[in-house]
Amino acid sequence: MIMFKRAVSAVSMALALQCLGGCAVAPWERGTLAKPQMALEPNPLQTELRGHAYGAREAATGSSSGSGGGCGCY
Amino acid sequence: MPANTASGYMKGAGAAEVNRLATTRISPALQALTAAALLLPGLTEPARAADDEASIQYGHYEESPRDVYSRVPSSEFGFDLKKIPNNFAPITVDSIHVQGKTLLRDRWRFTANYSEDTWSGATPVATAPAGFGGNKAYGGGGSVKHTDPSLGDTITGATPYIQSLTPVFDQNFNPVLDKGLDADFNQAYGFGPQPLTHTMTMASPETRKQGDFKLGYEWDEAAVDVGGGLSLENDYESRFVNWGGRLDFNSKLTTLNFSQSYTNSTVSALLDHDSLPYLGAIGYELNGKDDNGYIERFSDRLSGGNAILHGKREDIATNLSVTQVLSKSALAEAGVGYTHSSGFMENPYKATYAFFVAPDSFDATTGVYSNLTGSGIATTAFTEQRPNKRNQVNLNLRYVQHIAPLDAAMNLKYNYFFDDWGINAHTFEGKWVQPLPWGLTVTPTIRYYSQSAADFYHPYLVLKTAGSGDANNVAAYRALIQQYPNFSSDHRLSAYGALSGGVIVNKQFARGLNLEMGFEYYSHQGGLRLGGGEGGYADFSAYSANAALKVDLDTLGRSLAENGGGHHHHHHQHGPAQPAGLMFGHMLNMADDWMIGYQYMYGKQAGNLLQGAQPVADSAIISNNAVHNPNCANEQCFAAPSDMTMHMHMFMVMYAPTDWLNLMLMPTFMDMGMNMRQLDGTTTPSNTTLVGAATTHAGHEHQTGGIGDTNISALVKLYDDKLHHLHLGLGVSAPTGDVDIHLRPSHTYEIGLIHYGMQLGSGTWDFTPTLTYTGHRDDWGWGAQIQGVKRLQDHNESGYRLGDMLQATAWGSYRFLDWLGGTVRGIYTTQDSLHGAYDRPHVPIGTMDTPANHGGKYWDIGMGLNVTIPGGSLAGNSFGVEWIQPLRDDVNGIQLEREGALSAQWNYMF
């Protein structure tokens, strides 16, 4: 848990620092960000299908979605 | 809601947004710059979330067989631990997902989803030390007995054999192998570490269906959505609602996402009939009628004593996340989620062995507790018992970085999970999204998952008190829960790690068609957990493969517009309406035209049993029941179907290489269900016989589902003078549907193949010719079609072939409005009976298992409505629905009456 907290603070610090340097990205500078490969979730259908399989197999997966999913009782 | 978040963000960063920002807020100089920036390639085109999109996805998941061990006679004296062959089919899941998205009005978005999955296969029911012999031989006699010479009668896999183990423990309560008598006739024991093993059970196919929707409204810098849905299985039903929102800040560099959901589920699990006598569910009986789980016992005529485990469950999940643009080429997301669950969270099909070791069963000479001394060791298996509350927290981070030299994106994700069951888990995921020439994008993926065990996870339980061996002994149960208030041996709650890797290939075709294919290999191992986990007995691997076709209807519309108004206009005139249930009835008239379509068909049989065209009484069916009853495959009759339902989903892609030839590909996905009843005047045979075992398991619905056969056709125009049209269809049906679906073994017998009518395909290559004539004048239309199915092979891999079929139909149609038409038709169908018979294990129990009781002559009337959207963003779409009402059935042999059929279809030409 302590390790985890350290990791989280390190990552947040890094993100914050990077943001201070270059966060002011003007609208016309967002061409790269608008590319399809830069989507947070580039393959949503695929992610949903794999997520369903993980959710039926893993104790920690699938708990956060409010989208049904059934029993997975196998 | 990852998809929602993504699309929300993409809209925020999209070119349309750039444009809007530039024109509403920014100085003229910046406007000029922005206008210039918009001219740059790659800025205007991508990331435009499709307003109107249809997609279908098929997925297949398959696990490796589990390793199963048992105590088996050694080649010389006594017993040894041995891996026994496991022929049980592993878990497989086939799923289909259909999605439609549309922009209802300017700012309203609507998404509808339908998904369906069918699973079957062998799954662990409990765990014990391998030397205790939880996996036993099972027979069945004659042709259905599986034997392995090296193992005597030990059959592959095992029935859920929970009784009569051979438990032995050393003084520290470690398991010991009872090796039986050695060469000198002395009792011998094997001390030292002993692996565990699962006791496996096999499940017949079961289908789950889910429908859900989402309705969203968007402002310039915010969005909200509400959604809901329903997931249905025979033993599990979920209803859910959700809502969420998005807020953009800081010139859309920062986006806040929020979502919440509520799920309410009901479990009603039919407990394994075989195991009822020795499966302890007493805890749920003592509960009274508690939502956290209670047992209802009842008896039906086919299966006798039954028990259903009922429970209710609620889940409330809340998620909050922030997406931040970090630079021109990087963005990140951080989120937190909390889920509170309460109620019945058990897997009702998992049991845990409890060994009650009486203190006086210790023998100091041999150094073991065993059944040979004192009061011995009592073994009972109890249905698992989990806490009725669970609080779960998820923390996640995601980082997306553009890799300029390759124009690729690196997508990294980390999730930390913990709950109050003692589970904490880490998930790392990495994707490399690499665009390539020719519209290809290749994405290798890697994922690592590691979890600790739940506090109440125990592979098996040991109590240092005497037990009764009676699964429903209250005192023994109280002693158990005093020491173990909750317990589960479900390996999902054990400590383990999972490593998986895969690839996704995406191809963008012209006109907004996108094909995505993915493959992943997944390995679950105790040893893969950071710091070690459960033993190797629970390891398994799995692969999943999927293919999705997405159609961006907006892009299609645009490409049509670019092709010129005349062409565009032409496409939206579908001509006169045709019945929605008609296949191969429509041709594309112009070279290079495309059509995609989806057709749903539902059919139900229920009501009277018919012999020929007349209802037949049960007493007539069983009048020759002594031994060879021709009504039931020359065996005795015990059961008949009470209702049968079929749902079929057909997907069609059609292309016109020339104006006189169309090529068509039509894969199908289907599911079926059959309920049976006992024939009056019969007595269900004892379940200690093969036919009795099969009959007792006909007391609940049998289900199958998955891919059906695939049709490949060419349509050839023979005549067309704008008023009359004639075309010939030449097709083959490829045997892609299964014809070897099994029922699960029961009462130690292998029941073998399911009823003929429940198999998903014909199993043979079939020739499917059609001849179609259509005509029209003003608002009136008419037509006729002859369709045949000729089986091209003598028999399929299971030893039979379906009968040939011929169907004739004629219809008239009228267009009431520019966009609305109606059809009426008559249909005559004749189909031969089934030829041959199953040549693999199969136990006929009723009329539906007789090859001669298939096919017949049928007369129907069909009435339908058709809607064609003439203009607007959905122009080119057409919808149809048709109800087919049986007028007369004249069946071969004895069959269930038909109740009707529904067809619904959607087509899009471009």
Image (cartoon, rainbow, N blue to C red):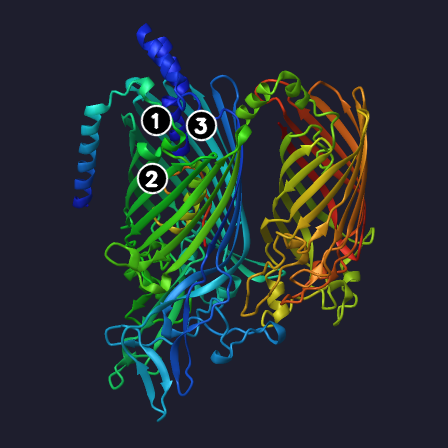
Q: CA distance from mark 1 to mark 3?
A: 31 Å
Residue B249 horizontal/vertical position (percent): 30, 20
Q: Which element type, helix, strand or loop, lies under badge 1?
A: loop
Dots 2 and 1 on the same chain: no
Cα–Cα gap, marks 2 and 3: 19 Å
Dot placed on the residue nearer the N-terminal end, 2 or 3: 3
Quadrant where the image shows the C terminus of chain B: top right
Q: Residue at x 64, y 49 (%)?
A: B709
Report which residue position mark 3 lands on. B226
Residue annotated with mark 2: B339
Q: Between tags 1 and 3, which lies in front?
A: 1
According to the picture, the residue beneath numbered tag 1 turns out to be A32
Note whether B868 is above or below B739 in the view shown.
Answer: above
Give the Cα distance between marks 2 and 1.
35 Å
B480 on left or right of B153: left
- Amino acid on which disc 3 is placed: Val
Seen in the image, is B723 located left or right of residue B163? Answer: right
Name the residue furthest bottom: B184
**Label 1 crowd bin: few (<14), some (14–19), many (20+), radius 10 Å:** many
- The percent position of residue B371, horizontal first and vertical second, equals 35, 79
Marker count (numbered): 3
Estimate the x, y position of residue B814 in percent, counting from the top left. 78, 24
Of B621 and A7, the residue lying toward us = A7
- Give the image quarter of residue B10: top left
User: Which chain does the residue under circle 1 lie in?
Assistant: A
Discs 1 and 3 share one subunit = no
Please name whichever residue, B349 or B202, is drawn nearer the observer in this view of the structure. B202
